[in-house]
Amino acid sequence: MAVSGLVNLSGLVDDAKCFAFVRQHRWPDGVRCPVCDSDAVIRDGCDDTQLCRQRYRCKACAGRFDDLTGTVLAGHHQPLRVWVLCLYFMGLNLSNRQIALELGLDASDTQAMTEQLRRGLVAKTPAVTLKGQVEIDEVYVVAGHKGQPDEVAKRGGSDGAASWQARRAAWCMDQGCRRIDPSPPAVRPCGHSLGVPALACG
């Protein structure tokens, strides 16, 4: 009978080091109260089931919290070392199925864990501020309105489809249209009418 080559990695990770890792990254400048942000915090024993999980008491607001309070890691039955390994495997771009196999978990549990971790990472990501010139590539008309310019104009207000060709023609005149069409339709692709010679565009 073949023996599985998988190693129980969660059993090789030390709980104390995992909690120290969380404290180091959560409070690089010292423990602070998650309620009032005061640094007047004292230790208040350890968790009954996880002895490496430090509890604290805030002297400013009398609030009580621990290493995981207010994080996506709080309130779950999986040990912290499993969460740390899951996050590590996510960084390696492993699939949820591969993570479940490595950690010996059900696929549904792994799915829930990765979703929680991703939400936590997104929440900590600073908002993106655009600067300088912003370019937009294309604009699409809703498929249900194709061939219905009146409906598009109604949706778009006074600057709807009725003025689209006029705006495009004005843009072509500003930018310079170099399109040469030997057999043009009733209206050129640049928005100009047949009254404007193709070679004169731009």
Image (cartoon, rainbow, N blue to C red):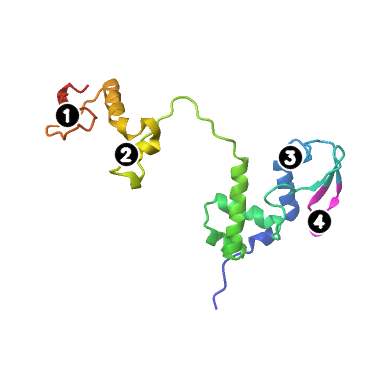
Marks 2/4: CA distance? 70 Å
Quarter of the figure that contains the C terminus: top left
Q: Amino acid at mark 2?
A: Asp
Instruction: Give how far apart the Cα atoms at labels 2 and 1 are.
Output: 31 Å
Labelled disc at residue 27: 3
Amino acid identity at mark 3: Trp
Q: Nearer the viewer, mark 3 or mark 2?
A: 2
* Alpha carbon distance from label 4 to label 3: 20 Å
Question: Which tag, 2 or 4, sits closer to the chain's start?
Answer: 4
Q: Which residue is mark 4?
A: 51
Provide the residue span drawn in magenta: 44-55
Above or below, 72 against 183 in this view is below
The residue tagged 1 is: 180
Q: CA distance from mark 3 to mark 1?
A: 65 Å
Q: Earlier in the sequence, mark 3 or mark 1?
A: 3
Callout 1 amino acid: Ile
**Towards the viewer: 11 or 87:** 87
Is disc 2 placed on a helix, strand or loop?
Answer: helix
Q: Is residue 82 magenta?
A: no
Q: State the mark number for residue 150.
A: 2
Q: Residue at x 76, y 48 (%)?
A: 67
Crowding near the residue tagged with mark 3, few <14, some 14–19, many ≥20 C-alpha atoms within 10 Å:
few
Q: Tell me what residue is drawn at x 15 percent, y 28 percent.
A: 194
Q: Is residue 121 left or right of residue 35?
A: left
Q: Helix, strand, or loop for circle 4?
A: loop
Real-space CA distance between mark 3 and mark 2, rounded to the nearest whole angstrom: 59 Å
Q: Hey, what amino acid is under mark 4?
A: Leu
Residue mark closest to the camera, 2 vs 1: 2
32 lies left or right of 129: right
Residue drawn at 39 percent across, 35 percent down = 156
Q: Where is residue 95 drawn, in percent x and y?
A: 52, 57
Q: Nearer the viewer, mark 3 or mark 1?
A: 1
